[in-house]
Amino acid sequence: RGRELSDGIKIVELQDSQSQVFLELQSKGLKGGGRFGQTTPPLVDFLKDILRRYPEGGQILKELIQNAEDAGATEVRFLYDETQYGTETLWSKDMAQYQGPAFYAYNDAIFTPEDWHGIQEIARSRKKDDPLKVGRFGIGFNSVYHITDVPSIFSGDQIGMLDPHQTLFGPHESGQCWNLKEDSKEINELTDQFAPFIGVFGSTKETFKNGNFPGTFFRFPLRLQPSQLSSNVYDKQKVLELFESFRADADTVLLFLKSVQDVSLYVREADGTEKLIFRVTASENKALKHERPNSIKILGTAINQYCKGVPSNSITCVTYHVNIVVEDESVKDAQKTSWLVCNCVGGRGMCTELDCLADDLKFVPTIGIAMSLSTNGEEKGAVVDFSGR
């Protein structure tokens, strides 16, 4: 049998004694007429190219935190779960390999319809439509494929699973989505398939019955053997190294975020025992509790004005104090650091070349600088110079 692709190539599949498949190529575009045009690479090849450009390590966690920030979330939790779930009632027997150890990422915001569309459009970040969004499901999100082959999302009343290999849900199908209410019959029949979404981050059987989860979490089953997408294999040790890589500079991660105030890392053993291994929180000085919210409001107004094209011949600068508290299982007492943060936004019309560049790239000309005020003998600072990617 055969099928014709959009570029005029006909694929003929034949089976010989060794069940081999060969391709017969028939060009139609160069003989006086017919289909002609450029094509896109297969999904797996496209993602492999992204993985070559985006490093693994703690940067993956930062991408997920930035997505939560853009959604307006205030809390992010990461969990490594060693639980081995059942494999009897699954969508297909091929799903069994994804019922074991997994890495989870939770935040307390809910997917919008735009988010559900955006996460499916890997070649185009919907951030381009909103310069205030730094990384909302842009290309960088796909760095999670360093860890997994089948990421899944649970948010609000929907559960979605992605399959870039297009082998689990049917030919040329790169994913599947279920609505908790409309697909409740199938969900109830596939109890093992959806068990990994119960008993984590407050999700219960009652959540499924009510048809709504008040937040979002991603589940990334660890890649246990090399695949066409990546030869990178993950186990508990590599996840803990991922956590450690993030921990190295976690005290500065929250400094320039406007929404996310709390990031924590957990491990759940195979017997269900769960423990906190690391947490970092940001807060205002009690004596200056309105300073940071007011500064962020002023900054947001300046950025909105710039995006709307409102002329300004001045730079908007705000300065505020932030307290960072780090809790580490290996350290008895929590560590507190005070910071002074300064953020600036350029005015529209101050530099025509800069405005043109910002509009082209969908960036906003901002810069942020932070200086540690703690007197522990260590001089430390941080800088950020983008409002878009």
Image (cartoon, rainbow, N blue to C red):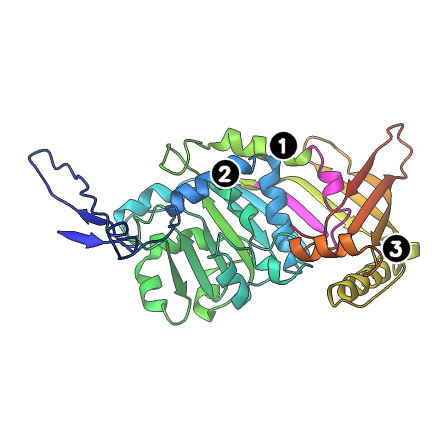
Residue hosting label 1: 244
Could you give the CA–CA distance between mark 3 and mark 2, rounded to whole angstroms? Answer: 37 Å
Q: Which mark is residue 51?
A: 2
Query: In percent of the image, x 44 and y 65: which residue is there?
Result: 208
Viewer-nearest of labels 3 and 1?
3
Q: Is residue 342 above or below residue 301?
A: above
Could you give the CA–CA distance between mark 1 and mark 2, rounded to whole angstroms? Answer: 21 Å
Q: Is residue 377 above or below residue 117?
A: above
**Tag 1 secondary structure:** helix
Residue range of the region highlighted in magenta in the rendering: 248-266
Rendering quarter of residue 56: top right
Query: Could you say where residue 89 lies in the image, as x and y percent from the top left?
Result: 29, 53
Residue hosting label 3: 318
- Does residue 374 appear left or right of residue 154 in this picture? right
Q: Nearer the viewer, residue 188 or 249?
A: 249
Query: Could you say where residue 154 lies in the image, as x and y percent from the top left?
Result: 48, 58
Packing grade of label 1 (10 A; few <14, some 14-19, many >=20) is some
* Tag 1–tag 2 contact (CB < 8 Å): no
Q: In the rendered structure, which amino acid carries the disc numbered 2?
A: Leu
Packing grade of label 2 (10 A; few <14, some 14-19, many >=20) is many
Q: In the rendered structure, which amino acid carries the disc numbered 1?
A: Glu
Q: In the rendered structure, which amino acid carries the disc numbered 3?
A: Val
* Residue 176 highlighted magenta (yes or no): no
- Does residue 308 appear left or right of residue 323 in this picture? left
- Who comes first in sequence, dot 1 or dot 2? 2
Viewer-nearest of labels 1 and 2?
2
Query: Could you say where residue 271 lies in the image, as x and y percent from the top left?
Result: 46, 39
* Tag 3–tag 1 contact (CB < 8 Å): no
**Tag 3 secondary structure:** strand
Answer whether residue 43 is visible to the viewer in this image. Answer: yes
